[in-house]
Image: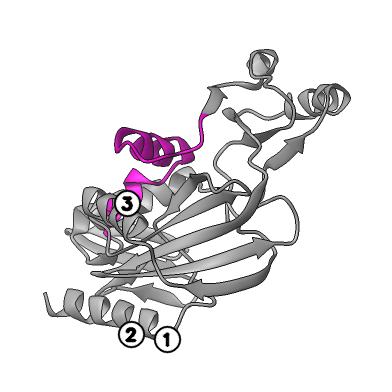
Amino acid sequence: MECIVKDSSLYFIDADGACKPDVIFWRLGAVNPEAKHRSILELIDYSGIPCVNSASTLLMGYDRLSMLNRLKKLGLPVIGFNVATGTDQLKNLEMQFPFVIKVGNHHGGYGKSLVTGEEQWEELKDLLFIHHDYVTTEQFIDYRYDIRYLAVHDKVWAMKRKGRYWKANSLTRKYQLMEPEEEWIGKVKQLQENIEADIVAIDVLETENGERFILEYNDIPGLSGFPETVKIELSEIIKNKLKQ
């Protein structure tokens, strides 16, 4: 699918023809965003077509680094990380084992590996050398479960989840809705207000001793496992944008 702006109007074009949207629900997730996707968001913003979330909000979290930077500036407990803009500097990113290495802007568990020892690290460095993207390393959090705090409009839900392997929010095998805690309602609402989001989620890792760290925020979060009232709230946001 391609996108054009002509006479200040936005059109999407594919093999079936052209479409001039009234409202856009952006659901591009679990992929490595391409430069074209950012260009499309800029054109949505330029054309003034209402979008959930707004194009300007989506552009803030478009890249993992800008997303993590936003959390850090808000003083939220994000996991600390090291970063290099190219794989030729991998030798300077080593941390105490075990640690997690993440390449570029991939989502959904892709581009990530748990490094448990020197031999594995040497092999990974050789493999990663062919990539031309930034690399981050962060200390491995041996989490008990992760919690997604989901804010839609003025309401907040929370879900406790457990993945099959070490990757949080990937191959989820157990989940349970829970009562949101006031402290974390405040944190997700602080973020929501700052980035002016209609919908946003924060994924929180909890360790065995009760420490909690924010892994990331997600401005196009999945809704699986959440009650139907979440979708109703979201549909109301879309209806209101159409009216405006």
Pick the residue in front: 76 or 200: 76
Sequence-wise, the earlier of marks 3 and 2 is: 3
- Residue 221 in the image: x percent, y percent? 45, 63
Secondary structure at badge 3 equals: helix
How far apart in space, not on screen, are marks 3 and 2 (Cα)? Answer: 23 Å
Left or right for 31, reference 154: right
- Chain part drawn in magenta: 54-80
Q: Which residue lies under the disc numbered 2?
A: 232
In the depicted view, which residue is nearer to us: 93 or 74?
74
Is residue 68 shown in magenta?
yes
Of the image marks 1 and 3, the number of the one nearer the N terminus: 3
From the top left corner, tell me how far across and down residue 235 is, in percent: 30, 82
Quarter occupied by residue 45: bottom left
Q: Residue furthest front?
A: 209
| Residue 175: image location, x then y, percent | 60, 72
How far is disc 1 from disc 3 in space, using C-alphas? 24 Å
Residue 43 is at least partly visible in this image: no
Residue drawn at x 39%, y 67% as measured from the top left:
180
Determine which residue is flagged by label 3. 187
Residue under circle 1? 228
Q: Amino acid at mark 1?
A: Glu
The residue mark sitting in front, 1 or 3, is: 3
Query: Mark 1 falls on what kind of element?
Result: helix
What is the CA distance from the residue labelled 1 to the residue labelled 2? 6 Å
Amino acid at circle 2: Ile
Q: Which part of the image, by quadrant, shows the C terminus? A: bottom left
Location of residue 186 with respect to 211 vertically, above or below: below
204 relative to 151 in the view: left or right: right
Where is residue 186 drawn, in percent x and y?
Answer: 28, 55
- Does residue 213 show up magenta in the picture? no
